[in-house]
């Protein structure tokens, strides 16, 4: 008869997408005296469930985790959002447990098999490399018994698939990260029934006929498709969008061929990707017509993350996206690297508050009038994070920002690499009202016109006494020492 442990692990293997068996296993671990592993399983299940839900809190957490990890830890999130606070606490505790105990929680396989593990997900070792593994059948039972569905990282898909099939481990795969392959290999794999177990696919190479390969009949279980590592021409993308069994995707990431048109986006919109929570369409060449097609797409009502970095969207397209009723649940809108100058102030003023939490406008070529229109829009009144970096903005834009945010301000405000001078620093330092007291992090680094006097003005401001972080380029060692003495987390600002 199976022991309780074996029965629980068997239930996890039989239901790899469900957390209930894992949480039952955590209870058994507690009862068996392994409280650390039990806590680790629960924490990672909590983080994975938040990722699947992709709430505004998780969108904020994920963005900062990947781009501003130090600030994520430095900020007092209890004053901003308890959801982000809980995610930060859970991730930090899980990481601490992993560092201290993770080596004991991976399957112990003889070194001659060269099975290499990297990372955990939902309480178990997750990413595995088998590129050097031999005689997998000798350890297949041990691997399957110890770890449920894994993500295989490989550069030789065809040979690894054959080896896994011979060992009876092909249906053990829940994800694939492929560094080099051809479409024929993906197509052949997609004709195997075991492929339906694969939930995530990330391709780190460019190939032709990719859409036809992913049209193979058993790519039906995909929820996360990452094609952001290599350009995809518009015709290939349009063919991919017409693949029926991909319409259950939750996450979709593209690096376009910089030749996409509004018709490409219309093909995407017409496909009916109603389950999407996160979309990245970067370097695709999208223009205002394409942006308006996205803004007018009712299928995107549940979208939480929309990253359109480095396209050709101007003020018209940016306005359409910000004012769209169909994108009202988007928590993160990424417009960085688009020439968004010329937004429509009247339309923005009429846009009601929605779910927007992060607005990334890094390098959007805004003028003072654009800043005025944006910061006065009700749609921005729900933000936690606003990025106006690298927009060549001067002190007049800072004045507009402070006037509009007098009684409320996004807690994290980025203004680096602009033309702000000591006068602008003075405007920020004299910021009165609830807006200033609600500000938790202010970044004005690489504004070369802010001298040591301007930095001192910011440090001495009683209105900015609540800051958790201040990013500046100091002009003297003495001023930098003062900043470091006040702010515990200093590196990276």
Image (cartoon, rainbow, N blue to C red):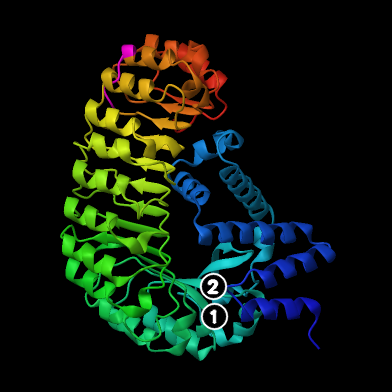
Q: Judge from the rendering whether residue 187 lies leftward or rightward of residue 238; answer left or right.
A: right
Callout 2 touching callout 1 (CB < 8 Å) = yes
Q: Earlier in the sequence, mark 2 or mark 1?
A: 2
The residue at which mark 1 appears reads as 172
Residue at 63% over, 81% down: 14
Which residues fall within the magenta stretch? Answer: 418-423
Q: Residue furthest top?
A: 453
**Is 175 in front, or is 382?**
382
Q: Main secondary structure of the magenta part?
A: loop
Q: Judge from the rendering whether residue 377 lies leftward or rightward of residue 292; answer left or right.
A: right
Q: Position of residue 97 (x, y in %)?
A: 68, 53
Q: Which mark is residue 98?
A: none
Is residue 419 a member of the stretch shown in magenta?
Answer: yes
Residue at 65% over, 59% down: 102
Q: Please determine whether, in this image, residue 360 is positioned above or below residue 411.
A: below
**Is 313 in front, or is 446?**
313
**Is 463 in front, or is 299?**
299
Q: Position of residue 300 (x, y in %)?
A: 36, 60
The residue at which mark 2 appears reads as 150
Q: Tell me the quarter of the picture where residue 450 sits.
A: top left
């Amino acid at each position: 008869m199976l022991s309780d442990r074996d029965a629980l692990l068997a239930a996890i293997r039989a239901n790899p997408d469900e957390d209930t068996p894992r949480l039952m296993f955590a209870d058994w671990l507690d009862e068996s005296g392994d409280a650390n592993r039990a806590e680790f399983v629960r924490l990672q299940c909590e983080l994975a469930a938040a990722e699947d839900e992709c709430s505004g809190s998780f969108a904020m957490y994920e963005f900062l985790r990947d781009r501003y990890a130090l600030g994520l830890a430095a900020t007092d999130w209890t004053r901003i959002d308890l959801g982000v606070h809980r995610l930060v606490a859970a991730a930090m505790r899980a990481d601490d447990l992993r560092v201290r105990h993770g080596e004991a929680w991976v399957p112990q396989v003889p070194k001659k098999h060269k099975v290499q593990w990297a990372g955990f997900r939902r309480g178990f070792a997750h990413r595995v490399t088998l590129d050097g593994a031999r005689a997998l059948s000798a350890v297949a039972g041990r691997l399957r018994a110890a770890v449920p569905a894994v993500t295989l990282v490989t550069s030789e898909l065809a040979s690894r698939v054959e080896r896994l099939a011979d060992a009876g481990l092909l249906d053990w795969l829940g994800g694939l990260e492929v560094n080099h392959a051809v479409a024929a290999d993906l197509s052949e794999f997609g004709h195997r029934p075991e492929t339906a177990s694969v939930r995530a696919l990330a391709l780190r190479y460019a190939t032709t006929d990719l859409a036809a390969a992913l049209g193979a009949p058993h790519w039906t279980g995909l929820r996360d498709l990452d094609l952001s590592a290599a350009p995809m021409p518009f015709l290939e993308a349009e063919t991919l969008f017409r693949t029926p069994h991909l319409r259950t995707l939750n996450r979709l990431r593209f690096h376009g061929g910089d030749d996409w048109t509004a018709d490409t986006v219309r093909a995407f919109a017409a496909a009916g990707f109603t389950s999407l929570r996160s979309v990245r369409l970067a370097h695709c060449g999208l223009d205002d017509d394409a942006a308006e097609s996205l803004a007018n797409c009712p299928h995107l009502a549940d979208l939480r993350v929309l990253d359109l970095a480095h396209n050709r969207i101007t003020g018209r397209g940016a306005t359409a996206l910000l004012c769209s009723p169909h994108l009202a649940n988007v928590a993160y809108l990424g417009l960085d690297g688009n020439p968004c100058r010329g937004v429509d102030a009247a339309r923005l003023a009429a846009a009601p508050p929605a779910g927007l939490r992060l607005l990334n406008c890094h390098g959007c070529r805004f003028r003072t009038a654009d800043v005025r229109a944006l910061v006065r829009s009700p749609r921005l009144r729900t933000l936690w994070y606003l990025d106006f970096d690298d927009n060549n903005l001067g002190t007049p834009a800072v004045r507009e920002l402070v006037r509009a945010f007098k009684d409320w301000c996004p807690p994290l405000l980025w203004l680096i690499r602009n033309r702000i001078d000591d006068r602008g620093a003075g405007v920020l330092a004299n910021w009165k009202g609830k807006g200033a007291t609600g500000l938790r992090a202010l970044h004005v680094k690489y504004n070369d016109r802010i001298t040591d006097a301007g930095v001192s003005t910011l440090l001495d401001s009683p209105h900015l006494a609540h800051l958790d972080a201040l990013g500046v380029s100091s002009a003297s060692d003495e001023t930098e020492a003062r900043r470091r003495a006040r702010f515990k987390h200093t590196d990276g600002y």
